[in-house]
C-alpha cells in the first residue's frame, strides 16, 4: 500500500536566485534542499525587462518586474529533481558569442528525501 506523507522538517532554507542581466540564465542553476524544508527564495531580476519564476511541482508562478526583487515561499513536499524556469517570454541575445533565449532560463531544484518509509 502506497502512503503519501506530508513531511515538514521545520527547517527554513533561504536561497537567492538571480536572473542575470542580459544573460538569459538564473544563478544558481542548481539548488539543493531536503524534502519537508520550507524554502524562502529572494528572487532578483537584474534585467530592464520582466521575467517570471515558475516551479510547477510546488505551485510557484510569479512575475518578476524589471529591476526588482520578489520573495517566493514554498515547502518541498516531494523528493526528486524539479525544474524552475522563466515563465514570461523575455527575448534573446548573444552571450559570450552564443545565442541565448528565454528557453535557456531553466534551473533545477534537487530535493533529497531524508525519510525512508518503514516496511
Image (cartoon, helix red, strand yellow):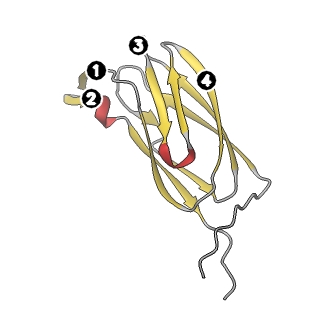
Quadrant containing the C terminus is bottom right
The quarter holding residue 100 reads: top left
Q: Give the SS element for disc 4.
A: strand
Q: Which residue is mark 1?
A: 91
Q: Please say if the residues under marks 3 and 2 sit with CB atoms less than 8 Å apart.
A: no
On the image, the x and y values in percent for residue 117 come to: 67, 79
Query: In the image, 8: left or right of 100?
Result: right
Q: CA distance from mark 3 to mark 4?
A: 14 Å
Q: Give the SS element for disc 3.
A: loop
Which of these two is toward me, 116 or 93? 116
Q: Please say if the residues under marks 1 and 3 sit with CB atoms less than 8 Å apart.
A: yes
Query: In the image, 80: left or right of 117?
Result: left
Q: In terms of sequence position, does the residue under pointer 4 or pointer 1 come before the other?
A: 4
Which of these two is toward me, 14 or 10? 10
Q: Which residue is mark 4?
A: 70
Q: In terms of sequence position, does the residue under pointer 3 or pointer 2 come before the other?
A: 3
Q: Is residue 88 above or below residue 74?
A: above
Amino acid at each position: 500500500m502506497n502512503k503519501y506523507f506530508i513531511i515538514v522538517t521545520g527547517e527554513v532554507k533561504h536561497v537567492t536566485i538571480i536572473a542575470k542581466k542580459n544573460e538569459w540564465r538564473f544563478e544558481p542553476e542548481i539548488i539543493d534542499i531536503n524534502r519537508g524544508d520550507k524554502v524562502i527564495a529572494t528572487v532578483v531580476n537584474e534585467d530592464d525587462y520582466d521575467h517570471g519564476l515558475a516551479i510547477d511541482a510546488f505551485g510557484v508562478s510569479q512575475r518578476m518586474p524589471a529591476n526588482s526583487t520578489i520573495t517566493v515561499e514554498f515547502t518541498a513536499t516531494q523528493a526528486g529533481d524539479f525544474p524552475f524556469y522563466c515563465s514570461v517570454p523575455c527575448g534573446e541575445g548573444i552571450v559570450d558569442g552564443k545565442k541565448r533565449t528565454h528557453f535557456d532560463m531553466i534551473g533545477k531544484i534537487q530535493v533529497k528525501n531524508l525519510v525512508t518509509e518503514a516496511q
